[in-house]
Amino acid sequence: MNAGPQMLIGIGAYLVVMIAIGLWYARKSNNNPEEYFLGKRGLGPWVAAISAEASDMSGWLLMGLPGVAYFTGSGEAFWTALGLAAGTWINWRLVAKRLRAYSQTAGNAITLPDFFSNRFHDRRRILMACAAVMILVFFSIYVGAQFVTFGKLFGYIFGAEDYYTAMVVMGAVIVIAYTLLGGFMAVCMTDLIQGILMVCAILVVLAVGFLRVGGFAGAGAVLADFPRFLDIFAVATPLDAAGNPVSAKAVQQVIAGKPLFGAGADYSFLNIVSCLAWGLGYFGMPQVLVRFMAIQNTGKIKESRRVALTWCVISLFAAVSLGLLGRAVFPGLLTTAGSAETVFLHLSRDFFPPLAAGLVLSGILAASMSSSDSYMLIVSSAVANDLFKGLFKKDAGEVLVMWVARITMLLVTVFGVIVALSGSQSIFRIVSYAWAGLGASFGPLMLFSLFWKRATLAGAVAGLLSGGVTVIIWKEWVSKAGGVFGVYELLPAFIISSLAIFAVSLCTKAPDPQILREFETAESAEF
C-alpha cells in the first residue's frame, strides 16, 4: 500500500469520530433554536475556552502562519502571533464576563446580532439586519479560506494539481454533515477535541523536527545563512531568478539546493503596529463571542481565560517555530508564498510512517473543521434567526427557523467553494481580509455596547457599517498607495468605526431610561 491511502486511513479514522459526535448531539440539540445555536448556555470552562480558540485559529494556524514564517522569516509571523496572544487575553479579561451577563439581561439574546438589537432596543431591527449581513459577507469568505486548506491537504496527499474535487468531498461535505446534524453543542465538543489535536500535532512535529536538525543550534546554523531570517525586527527578502524580491506569484530562485535571499529589510514601527493590530480583531469575532454568551455562568470565566490563554500562546508560537524549522529542514523545497503554506504537510510526511502521518495531518483537518463548522453555524443563525425571523417573518415557528438555518448552511458551503476556486491560494491573506472585516465591524461596537452607556442605536449602526466598508475600501484601493497607507486594514477601520460610534452617539438623542437601567444591571449581574 502506498503512502497516500495509508494517510487517508489515519484521517478517515478521525473523521468517523467527528461524525459520531455529530450524530450523538443530533439527539440532544434539535429541539429549539436556543439549543441549536447556543447549547442552552451550558458550556463548561474547558469546552468554552478551547472551542473558542480552536474555532478562531482555523487552518491558518497550521498552514497560513507557518507559511509566512517559512517564506519571509520570523518578523511578520512573530508580531502577528504576539498581537493575537495579547488580544486573546484582553478579550477574555475585559469582554467575556460582561457579555455573558449582558446578553442574558438584554432579552436572553442567543446570537450576536440579537444581542446588539436588544441592547439598543432596535425595534425596527435595522442594526440586527446590518449585523447579520456583515456576518454573512465576511464569514462566507472565511469558509472559503478553510476550503483552500482542505484542498491543499488532499491535493498533497494525492499528489494532484487539480485537488478541488477532493476538497469538496472530504472537506465541505463532512463539515456540513455534522454541523447540520448536531448544532452548537456538536460544534463545541468537536472543537474541543480538534483544539487538543491541533496543539498535539504541532508539538509532536516540532519535537521530531528539532531532533532531526540537531536541536536549536542545528536549525540556527542553517537559518543563519539567510540574511535577517531570525530577526524579529526585519523581514527576509526571497529573490526570484532575476534577482528581484519575489512578488505574490513569482518563484524564489534556488541554486544547488540553497534558496536566494536579498539583504533583508527593516520591519518598521508601522509594520509592527500593523501586525499587533491583529489582536483588535478578537473584540469582534462572533465565533469567540458566542462562546462567552454560552458559558455556564460568569464564575467559570476565570478558569476558561487561563485555559484559553495557555492554549493560544503555545499554539501560536509553536506555529511560528514550525515555519522556521521547516526552512531549516527543507531550505529550497517551497519556492512560492502559496506553496510555503504546505510546510507542515511536508514535515509530517517526512518524519512519520504514512499511517502515523495521516493522524498527525488530521491536525490540519481539525483546524479547518473547527473553524468552518463555527462559521457555518453563526452565518445560519444570523440569516435564520436575525434576518428571516427578526425582519421578514416575525411569527416564524422554531421548526421553520431551523430549516432556514440548514438551507443557509448549504448555500454558504457553495459560496465558500466558489471563493476557494477564485484563484487565491494564500490562506493567510484570505483570512486576514475576513478577520479585518469582522473585527472592524463588530469590535468597536462590542466595546462601546458593553462599556459606554451613552452609545445610541444610530451610533451603533454608523460604527458597524463604517468599519466593514472601510476594510473593503482600504484593502481594495487605499492600501495600493503604499507607505503609511499600507498598514493592515483592520487598524484604520477599527479607529474609524470607533470615532463614528462616539461622534454619532453624541449627536443623537441619549438612550431612554430603560436602556440605561439594563446597562447598570448588567454591570453587576452574575449568572
Image (spheres, rainbow, N blue to C red):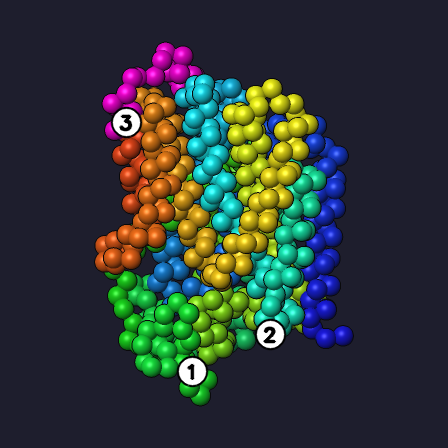
Disc 2 and disc 1: Cα gap in Å? Answer: 21 Å
Q: What is the crowding at mark 1: few (fewer than 14 residues within 10 Å), some, or many (at least 20)?
A: some
Q: What numbered label is drawn on residue 381?
A: none
Residue 470 appears at what percent x and percent y? 33, 43
Can you tell which of label 3 and label 2 is closer to the viewer?
A: 3
| Residue drawn where x is 42% and y is 75% of the image | 251
Of callouts 1 and 3, which one flags the residue occurring earlier in the amino acid sequence?
Answer: 1
Furthest residue toward top: 513
Q: Magenta stretch containing residue 215, yes or no?
A: no
- Mark 2: which secondary structure? helix
Q: What numbered label is drawn on residue 350?
A: 2
Q: Is residue 8 above or below residue 473?
A: below
Q: Is residue 101 above or below residue 46?
A: above
Quadrant of the rendered image containing residue 344? bottom right
Total marks placed: 3
| Residue drawn where x is 65% and y is 46% of the image | 176
Quadrant of the rendered image containing residue 178? top right
Q: What is the crowding at mark 3: few (fewer than 14 residues within 10 Å), some, or many (at least 20)?
A: some
Residue 215 appears at what percent x and percent y? 49, 72
Of 251 and 329, which appears nearest the observer? Answer: 251
Q: What numbered label is drawn on residue 504?
A: 3
| Residue drawn where x is 43% and y is 26% of the image | 126
Quadrant of the rendered image containing residue 242? bottom left
Disc 3 and disc 2: Cα gap in Å? Answer: 57 Å
Question: Quadrant of the image for the N terminus?
Answer: bottom right
Of callouts 2 and 1, which one flags the residue occurring earlier in the amino acid sequence?
Answer: 1
Res. 347 in view: yes
The region drawn magenta spans 503-527
Say which residue label 1 marks: 254
- Assign the magenta stretch its main secondary structure: helix
- Mark 3: which secondary structure? helix
